Image (spheres, rainbow, N blue to C red):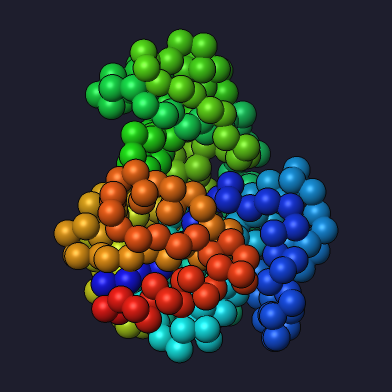
Amino acid sequence: MIITVFPGQGSQTPGFLTPWLELEGARERLERYAEAAQADLVAAGTEWDAERIRDTAVAQPLIVAASLLSYAALQDAAGAAPAGVAGHSVGEVAALVAAGVVSEDDGMRLVGLRGRAMADAAAREQTGMSAILGGDRDGVLALLDELELTPANHNGAGQIVAAGAQDALAELTAHPVAGSRVIPLQVAGAFHTSYMAPAVATLRTAAAEVAASDPALALWTNRDGARVASGREALDLLVAQVSSPVRWDLCMESFADAGVTGIIELAPAGTLTGLAKRALRGVPTVAVKTPDDLAAAAALLTGGDA
């Protein structure tokens, strides 16, 4: 089983969409996505600097647009679809589109609204996120509980992302668990925590008006790594995920249980294949960062049992 995965916020870099716009029809597709998301994605992906594309309202639709653009290019190159899909955090929007749960236009409308609503929620208090690499897992979780921080992303491969108040994150950095390393993340707030409750309410209202079909491909949820068979349930989980932890560790365990034999990460790629290399040793991976990577990804897709 060959699957494709879609990255989350923080994976974007200045100018990363430039080579993709050389593909036939790519600019027109991106302009359509931009109209749906109400964001200037062409300029954001080719001209804007790191600080400007760090803005949650920009980063989220930009990442999903890149994932969908590269997913379409992969299907064109391979003439085939994967057997399953999953997305990390905002990448779940791209996964639902790829699985046929929602249309491209509805997916881009939702992610544009999601980004704006989460940016608004993040602006209410001084919060943030920090990645914790290594250290005893139980000890890390105990320290987060003591500091009233939320383990917002369980990424597997010895990585947990903490989220919460900036003073508590500073204390975590100053006094980490033995054997761990703390890296502050360039995000605007404490995503996947109760701080995002206002954004959930906004997104839930919008999602109720979106048509949802049952997934045509295997689809795994960030909630607990389980496979989701109902399109409406997948959409409801996507909404709730905004203020609840991302369990990518459980998604990877489910990939192993399902017999996944290859993983292709779509643009802006690299983070999820890096985690897979450590947690799912021996499973071939391809990170599609530029169009030059499409041939290797198509070879994995068509050479497997997708």
Q: Which residue sits furthest bottom?
A: 79
Where is residue 183? Give x, y as percent.
Answer: 53, 28
Q: Which residue sits furthest top?
A: 175
Camera-nearest residue between 252 and 225: 252
Q: Is residue 234 left or right of residue 243?
A: left
Where is residue 300? Give x, y as percent.
Answer: 39, 72
Q: Residue at x 49, y 56 (%)?
A: 7
Q: Residue at x 39, y 34 (%)?
A: 160
> Quick one: quadrant of the C terminus?
bottom left
Camera-nearest residue between 39 and 268: 268
Q: Residue at x 57, y 23 (%)?
A: 166
Where is residue 96? Give x, y as percent.
Answer: 42, 71
Q: Residue at x 25, y 60 (%)?
A: 255
Residue 165 appearing in the image: no
> Quick one: quadrant of the N terminus?
bottom left
In the displayed structure, would residue 131 be above or below residue 19?
above
In the displayed structure, would residue 259 be above or below residue 142?
below
Picture mark count = 0
Camera-nearest residue between 198 and 21: 21
Q: Is residue 140 left or right of residue 183?
A: left
Residue 132 appearing in the image: yes
In the displayed structure, would residue 51 be above or below residue 38?
above
Where is residue 144? Give x, y as percent.
Answer: 37, 23
Q: Is residue 134 left or right of residue 69?
A: left
